[in-house]
Structure formats: C-alpha cells, structure tokens
Amino acid sequence: GTFTSWNCSAFSASSTPSYAQREQVVRNYFDGVNKKDRDQIRNCFSTEAYIRDVCALNSSERAVNPDDLADRCMEFLQAHPDCKVDFHYGPKCSHDDNWVIAHWYETGHWTGDSRGIKATGNPMAVEGQTRFLVNDDMMIERFTVTRTFTEWEETLQNL
C-alpha cells in the first residue's frame, strides 16, 4: 500500500473526525514504521495509551508511555532494518465506534543486532491484526494486538 505522511496531532478537535481521518492516524503509524521515524510513531499515541497484546506472556491491558512504545518499535527495527509493513485488510474504521482495524504483515530479515541479541540473517515474515481506538484528538488511545512473533522477539522473551 501507499502511505501518505500526515501529522497525527495536526487535526483540529473542533469537529468530530471522520472515519477516513481516524484511519489515516493508523496509516501514519505504520508509515512511521516503514520510514523508521521514531517521532512519527510516537506522535500517533496519546500521552497515556493502553495496550493489550493478546499473544504476549502478559496479555492483560496495561498503560504504556508513548516514548516507550516508540523505543520498543525502534529496537525491533534495529533488528530488522529492511522491515516493510503492508496490509491484507484496512486500516478500516468501524462505523459503530472509533476503533480502526488493520490486518497487517511484515517482511524482512534479522540482520541487525538489537538489545544484545546477535542477528542471524534469517528471513522474517510475521502478521497480525490490531484494533486501534483513535480518540477525537486524533491520537491512538488504546490498541489490542493479536500477532505472530519474529525469531528476535522469541529470543528476547527467553532472556
């Protein structure tokens, strides 16, 4: 897919955002991943965001700092410098609420050392589905992820 760069926080909250505008916030997040742009990733999240990673060891919803989210994403991208995200479906905003759904996939190779873990050079192909709650300030406030893990993530969990 083609991404359009867009500042998540540039929207004026004087009116209710459209479905397309909420979808664009999520597209901008994934665009930041593809560009390896930490600030673009970070600026898509509200100052207090909540994540539920259904496949993680701790699958309960927890508060996360946007800077920590961006840093974790950059550690992943350091391990997978040629990572590319694309979509099987979405991002598409529900017309019943403000949740945006994306069925995404990432491809690349584990060619970078990150978090003290040596690269193997192995190919990487993972996918997942994420629900993003985009608030009226055009920021991601909550998200729930169901996904597969890369070899690097599996190694990191076992440290």
Image (cartoon, rainbow, N blue to C red):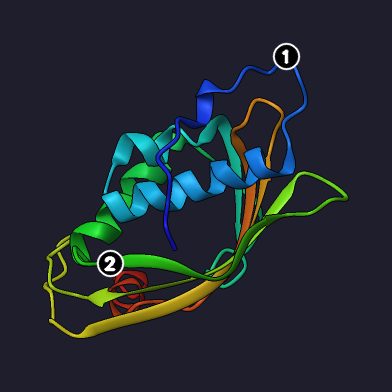
Q: Give residue 6's position: percent from left, percent from top.
A: 45, 35
The amino acid pointed to by label 2 is Cys
Quadrant containing the N terminus is: bottom left
Q: Which residue is mark 2?
A: 83
Q: Quadrant of the C terminus?
A: bottom left
Q: Residue furthest bottom?
A: 122
Q: CA distance from mark 1 to mark 2?
A: 37 Å
Disc 1: which residue: 14
Q: Residue at x 42, y 78 (%)?
A: 126
Say whether marks 1 and 2 touch (CB < 8 Å).
no
Q: Position of residue 59 (x, y in %)?
A: 62, 64
The picture quadrant where one finds residue 14 is top right
Horizontally, residue 96 falls left or right of residue 74, namely right
Q: Quadrant of residue 88?
A: bottom right
Please tell me whether residue 84 is drawn above or below residue 88 in the rendered image: above
**Residue at 19% across / 63% down in the picture?**
81
Q: Position of residue 128 (x, y in %)?
A: 54, 72
User: Label 1 sits on what residue type?
Assistant: Ser
Q: Residue at x 68, y 18 (%)?
A: 13
> For the residue labelled by badge 1, is the local secondary structure a helix, a strand or a loop?
loop
- The reply, left or right, for residue 4 in relation to residue 132 is left
Tell which of 3 and 159 is nearer to you: 3
Residue in the image at 57% along x and 63% along y: 58
Rate crowding at label 1 as few (under 14), some (14 to 19) or many (20 or more) other CA atoms within 10 Å. few
Q: In x, y percent, where is residue 2? A: 42, 57
Q: Which mark is residue 89?
A: none
**Does 3 appear above or below 149?**
above
